[in-house]
Image (spheres, rainbow, N blue to C red):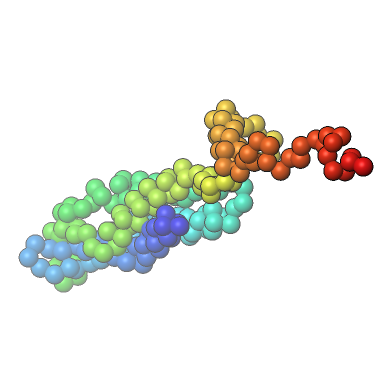
Amino acid sequence: MLLVFACVAAAAMLGASQFTDIFHLTPPGGEALQAISSKDQHGYATLVLAIFALVLILVTLGARDEQLRQVAAMAVAICGLIALLIFLIGDLPDVNKIGTLDDPRQSFIDAEAKPVAGFWLEFAGSLVLTVCGAALATMRPDTATSPGHERRRKPGVARTQAERRSERTTQARERDVRPRTPRGEGLQAPLRRDDPPYQR
């Protein structure tokens, strides 16, 4: 469940980055003159990936088939990987990049692209979604059982040699702890002809 919560939080961060500035174009020693959002960089790609990841997380939680659950969880990781590639290819190369900005107050100003909140939200969301989605896809259901109970198996699946050996050991232990009746106790000796019932 911790992995599921981490995936949901990562998808939320990825979606929030869509509505937050990722760069501020700032001249040297001055204030930001222009903001660059995720829409300006790559449209609504991160928002679509975040929504798709949330839907797949719900499928992962509701799936009763183990194979479907793993496929849905792997698709969550793929959404995070695509978002991470968008970040690495489209956004990361522009960090601290200096270019000429045509500002109406002053023509052709050199400005630097400084990363702000949306940049880090996109990075954290895509990275956590990739890692936690992959970890969720590799999880296996808990097969541990309580003492004295046989391990659960799917119908039609043959028992392994270790399981048969464990079952024999358990049965042997149960025989050892059963109370034993001393030899001859509770048994009646055969009657002889000179015993009272046969005496005249």
Q: Quadrant of the C terminus?
A: top right
Which of these two is toward me, 75 or 160? 160
Q: Quick check: can you spot residue 70? A: no
- Number of numbered labels in the structure image: 0
* Residue 67 image point, x, y percent: 58, 43
Q: Quadrant of the N terminus?
A: bottom left
* Residue 80 image point, x, y percent: 40, 50
* Residue 149 image point, x, y percent: 59, 46
Q: Residue at x 57, y 27 (%)?
A: 161
Q: In the visual, does 198 lie left or right of 64?
A: right
Q: Quick check: can you spot residue 122? A: yes
Q: In the visual, does 79 lie left or right of 99?
A: right
The residue lying furthest to the left in this view is: 29
Q: Residue at x 50, y 56 (%)?
A: 57
157 shown above or below 132:
above
Which of these two is toward me, 183 or 111? 183
Q: Residue at x 84, y 36 (%)?
A: 194
The residue lying furthest to the bottom in this view is: 105
190 shown above or below 93:
above
* Residue 31 image point, x, y percent: 13, 70
Which of these two is toward me, 55 or 163? 163
Q: In the visual, does 4 lie left or right of 176?
A: left
Q: Looking at the rendering, which quadrant does residue 96 occupy?
A: bottom left
Q: In the visual, does 44 lie left or right of 174?
A: left
Which of these two is toward me, 25 or 75? 75
